[in-house]
Amino acid sequence: MTNSLTRQDSKPSKSKEIKDNVVEGVLQNYLDQLLVTATQPQRVEKAIHIPDIDEQKAVDTGAIETSKSIAEKTLTENALETVSKPKVEIEQVEAEQVKVELIRTETAAVPKVESAPKVEHIAKTLVETVPALDTVIDVSDINNTVSSDIESAIKQSISTLTDQESWSSQGVECLLFSVSGLKLAVPLLLLGGVHEVISDDVKPLIGQPKWYLGLIHREDQNLQVIDTATFIMPERAESLAEQGYKYLIQLEKSPWAIACQSIDDTVRLEASEIKWRGDRGKRVWLAGTVIEKMCALIDVSGLLQRVESSCKPV
Amino acid sequence: MSANATKSAEDPILQWAIFRLENESYGINVMQVQEVLRYTEIAPVPGAPPYVLGIINLRGNVVTVMDTRSRFALPHAETTDQTRIVIIEAENQVVGILVDAVAEVVYLRQSEIETTPNVGNEESAKFIQGVCHKNDELLILVDLEKLMTDEEWMEISGF
């Protein structure tokens, strides 16, 4: 009797499971279709209003300031401040560890920094490797190592920001921008900067592929500009070189920047809002899609890897 | 050795002759430039490869003139008053390159020159030796030796 009841109970449970799987499959297809639809020019023209550059100026200024300040503050200042003086006592090394803890706390407030334990471990290891606790030692070399290790650890942790697990429950501020009718989002923490393009600032180089728009000099460095439309949506045969572009979004602190036509807004995206893309084999630049905002979230590290994989040093 | 001399040895200063093509500035090592000529009639050579415009008579010597625009995959343009033929020496040969204009000679430290990632598979991408930002202008530095392949250099030596 009990067994029959159990069987009876298990039947609806199984059918529910199957139903859930079907729903999930349908949802998955729907989301994939959504991205495909969003990348089709005809539909996009009807569905999405591409704001004029003039309309966006007020919004853009705010977005640029916010992105710059947050990205630069978090990425560079905190990481590089950590070590600077040539000679310190061992207590100072401990102080560095406290600073590292602070960095971890600050970065954890927005995204979850996975490599924070690694940073702590680096500091611990250094404390352990100091020969004598009372001795004042020249730690300039160690400082350099700590600096570079912390920098790389933080960089690595931030690079994984587009992984689902790295997103905190509070969400992450993202910058929304438009490229040939497609709305894209990039986490502010992964922005190296947003640059406005004035007239023919971007200098094309001979013999480069279509997705390479050229070079531009900004803030004492040459940025290499990617035609975002051509690079991420080659099947659409859209080209920003023909359509024009107004802004460049620098990816992290790399020398690469993606071109876009307008900067729309900054929004806080939560992990639950994002339909994460598990298999990124097809579109390595895509971290996921956000239905509510009708946008695609860029996987910055994936995009950079793809760009750099197609580059050979001269 | 003085500090300045050491610095110069570590970071040599090179002179680059700047010419313009399609509104971009290109630099070539000034040591490879023999002279700059105003545009003169170029006699076409039957059967010459497409990158050869023809030949000119330079004080009794025949000099092959290359179509730089064609080499750089740039569209054809009419000659103007600014058009020049830069006589260069590369791969032990003297050839002329037709350019839109010749601008100036600039001094660049080796450290100022940035290499660019070669993202292109096209032949013309290989010409770029580096880039440099000077006086609010991006200079594209050209390696003249790579302007043509060994076979092409051999081919034009026959003219």
Image (cartoon, coloured by chain):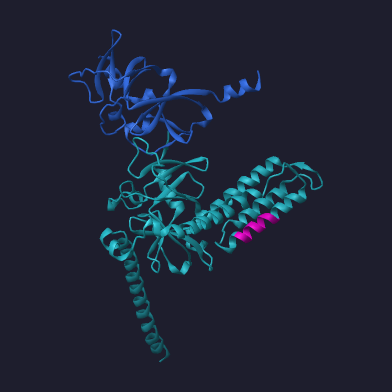
Is residue B92 in sight in this rendering? yes
Chain identifier of the blue chain: B
Q: Nearer the viewer, residue B62 or B50?
A: B62
- Name the outermost residue toward the top: B60
Chain identifier of the cyan chain: A
Q: Nearer the viewer, residue B107 or A31?
A: B107
- Name the outermost residue toward the left: B46
Q: Pick the quarter of the image with the N terminus of chain A.
A: bottom left
Quick check: B51 above or below A1?
A: above
Quick check: A235 above or below A142?
A: below
Quick check: B56 above or below B132?
A: above
The x, y position of residue B106, in whole percent, is: 47, 25
Task: Report the predominant secondary structure element of the magenta stretch.
Answer: helix
The x, y position of residue B85, in whole percent, is: 32, 20
Is residue A297 in sight in this rendering? no
For the point 34% across and 74% down, which residue is it? A23
The x, y position of residue A189, in whole percent, is: 52, 56
- Name the outermost residue toward the front: B81
Give yes or no for residue A41 being in the magenta stretch.
no
The stretch of residues the image draws in magenta is A98-106
